[in-house]
Amino acid sequence: MHNILKFLFIVFLMLSAEDTLAIDRYLTWVDPQTQLRVKINMETYELLTEKDSNGWLNEGKIKLDTAIFNTIPSRFKNDYFLFDNGKRIRLTIDGAGHVFDYFPLKKELIRVDRTYHSGYNFFSNKFVRNGIIYSIGGVGFWSHSTAITYFDEKIREWEILRPKNLIPIPIVHGYQGYDNKLDVYYSGGSATTDYLEDQKFTIRDEFFLFDFKKNKWNFLGKLNPDLPLNMPQKVIWTGNFFLHFYNNHIYILDPKSNKVYLYKNNKQSFLLGSATHLNKDTLTNFWADNAGAIQKISIAEIKSKSVYWGEFYSSGISTFWYYLDLSIILAVGLLVKWQHSRSRKNNELILSVKERKLVQKLLDLNEDEYLTTHDINDVFETKDKSQENQRRIRFNIINELNDKLNQKFGHENGIDRKTLPSDKRLIVYVINSNIKSELKKLFK
C-alpha cells in the first residue's frame, strides 16, 4: 500500500510539473483603433482581442508557418511598432533578433529576419528612426551592452552602428529615450550589476546624449541626486520628456530644458501595471492578463498641475574628468594613427593569420571568380559557430583588414563586398581591382 501511494504521489508531481511547464506565450500589441490589447497565442495560433472589462474575444486562428516560433525562448516579452497606418504591425522579441510582421487585414503573421536567438540585449531600448527599428544597450551573458544596432531590411539582419566614441556606462533601465525631432538619444540613470560573488546593484548617475547627425556621444552632466533613483520606479518616455512615477508623485523631466517638474496627489496612487501604452495625451495602464485598462492618466492635466522642482542634471568636475578621458583616448588614437602612417611609409603591411589566409584565397581567384559567405566562413573556420557569430567574425576581420589596406594603398574597400547581378540576394567578396596588382607583388 505504501508503494502504491508513493507511485501515485510521483505521478501527481510529474503531472503538476508538466502543467507548470505548459506556459501560454503571446505576441501582444495595442490596437490603434480601439486602444485595447491584441495578442496571438503562440501555442494555439489564435488571435485574441480585448473587449475592455468584458474579457477577451477569440477571433480564430491566423495564417502563419508554425516553424517561425521554433527558436523563441520559453519566456519573453515583445515590443511592437505600427507601420503603414496600422496595416502592418512589426513585432520584435526582447533579447533576440526575431522580427515579425503581422497584417491585420489578412490575419497573417510572417517572420522577416534571418537571425538566431542571441541573448545579449535583454531590456534594450527599441525605437523607430527614419522608418528603421533601432535597438540600444541591454544586458545578457552576464555583461552589459552599449551597442547601437538597427534592422537592415535588405539583408534581413541586425547591423551595428559604429559611433565615433563609446559611452562609458551601460545602457539599461533608467532614463532611456529617442527624441525624433532633435534626432538624439538620451541615456542615464542606468542600473548595473557587477556579477561578482557578492553581487551588487548600482544606479549610475551620469547622463548622456547620442547625436545621430554627428554620430557621437556627449556627456550632459550628473543627474540630480535628489531624484528617487534608488527607489522602486517606473519611467516612461513620451517622445519629449520622461515621466518618473514614484508612489503618489510624478516627476516630469525635460532633458532639453534641463528642468524637472513635480506633480503630487495625496489622494491618488498610480497603479502601474505590467504594460503601459501611450497615445497622444493619454497614458493607459494594463494589468497582466486582466481585461481592460486599470487606469488612464491625462498627461496634459498632470503638467498643468505640476510645479517646478529643480534641475534634471548638473555639470561640474565630472565634466572635466570626462573630457580629460576623451583627450587621453584621442591622444592614444593619434599615436596609433601615426604608427600606422609610419608603417605605411616603411612599406609594411602587417596582417594576422586569418587576414593573410583571406587575401591569399582571394588573390588565387580568376577574374570572374569570387568568394561567397560560406567560403569566407571556411577560411575563418567558423562552421561550427552560430550564424550570428559567423556574421560578427566576418564583419570584424574584414573591417580591420580593409583599414590596413586603406592605409597601405589609399582605397577604402580593399576587400569589396558586392551583390551578384544574377541574384541580388547573394553577397560575394573580391579584391578591389585598383589594388590587386600591387597586393600580388607583396604576396610573391
Image (tube, rainbow, N blue to C red):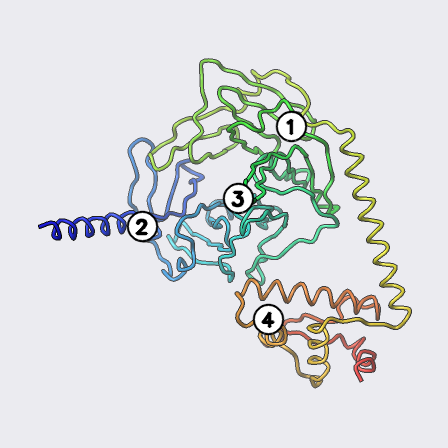
The amino acid beneath tag 3 is Phe
Determine which residue is flagged by label 4: 424
Q: Which residue is mark 2?
A: 21
The foreground one among 268 and 100 is 268
Q: Disc 3 versus disc 4: distance between alpha carbons?
A: 35 Å
Q: Is residue 150 left or right of residue 361?
A: left
Q: What residue is pinned by disc 3?
A: 123
The residue drawn where x is 42% and y is 53% is 73
Q: How many other residues sit within 10 Å of disc 3, few (<14), some (14-19) or many (≥20)?
A: some
- Residue 14 marker: none
Q: Which secondary structure lies at badge 3?
A: loop
Q: Which numbered disc flags the more N-terminal residue, 2 or 1?
A: 2
Which percent across, then down, holds residue 147? 63, 50
Which residue is found at the position 43% from the left and 47% from the top? 76
Mark 2 vs mark 3: in front:
2
Graded by Cα atoms within 10 Å as few (under 14), some (14 to 19) or many (20 or more), the crowding at tag 2 reads: few
Camera-near label (1 vs 4) is: 1
Q: What's the distance in space between the residues labelled 1 and 4, CA to CA?
A: 46 Å
Residues at circles 1 and 3 in contact by the CB criterion of under 8 Å: no
Q: Residues within 10 Å of mark 1 (few under 14, many from 20)?
A: some
Assess whether mark 4 and mark 3 are in contact (beta carbons under 8 angstroms).
no
